[in-house]
Structures are given as C-alpha cells and as structure tokens.
Amino acid sequence: MATPKKATSSRRKGLRHAGQTHKLYVTQSATCPNCQEIMRPHAACPVCGYYKGQAAVEIKTKAAKTEEETSEKK
C-alpha cells in the first residue's frame, strides 16, 4: 500500500477538525407560547416553567429564594 510522502501531522489534522465545531452544536430556538420568551424547543420554558400549555416546572423567584434561606438560618 502506498504511503504519503508528507504525512499529515496530528496538529494539522486537529486544526482542520477544530474549525467545524460550529456545525456540530447549532441550536434552534423557539418562543414560549405562554410568556413569549426565547427557549429551547421540546423543553420547559426556563422563565415561566410551562411546556405545551401546562405548568411543568415550578420556577422560584429570587425573592422566594432569599425568604427560604433566611427561614432556614433561623
């Protein structure tokens, strides 16, 4: 079997492959029908917690988190 006269080094091969990562990790976005925020498709909205018109996840606000922390410390 023939051998290339100048073999491609691992560094050159890595540089060639590194430039194509933008094609691998392209994400789509959708808008939440409940709050109109941008979210990932087929996932619960990170802002309101709704998925397909139903409450799927309970979202805690910053005020609720601080109240819980203060009540736990007492």
Image: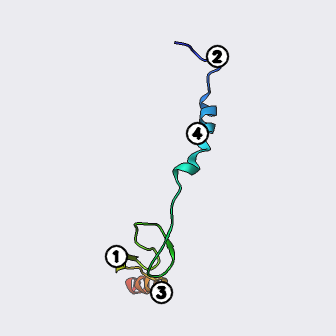
Element on which disc 2 rests = loop
- Residue 17: which numbered mark, if any? 4
Closer to the camera in the image, 49 or 51: 51
Along the polypeptide, which appears first: circle 3 or circle 2?
2
Quadrant location of the C terminus in the rendered image: bottom left
Q: Position of residue 18 (x, y in %)?
A: 60, 42
Identify residue type, mark 1. Ala
Along the polypeptide, which appears first: circle 2 or circle 1?
2
49 left or right of 2? left
Q: CA distance from mark 2 to mark 4?
A: 22 Å
Closer to the camera in the image, 61 or 24: 24
Q: Report the residue marked by disc 2.
A: 5
Along the polypeptide, which appears first: circle 4 or circle 3?
4
Query: Farthest residue in the top direction?
Result: 1
Kindly indicate the quadrant of the structure image that contains residue 69.
bottom left
Name the mark nearer the viewer: 1 or 3.
1
Q: Report the residue marked by disc 1.
A: 56
Q: Position of residue 56 (x, y in %)?
A: 34, 76
Q: Report the residue marked by disc 3.
A: 63
Residue 3 sits above or below residue 67 on the image: above
Instruction: Check contact, mark 2 vs mark 4: CB within 8 A.
Output: no
Residue 48 sits above or below residue 25 on the image: below
Identify residue type, mark 3. Ala
Q: CA distance from mark 1 to mark 4?
A: 40 Å
Identify residue type, mark 4. His
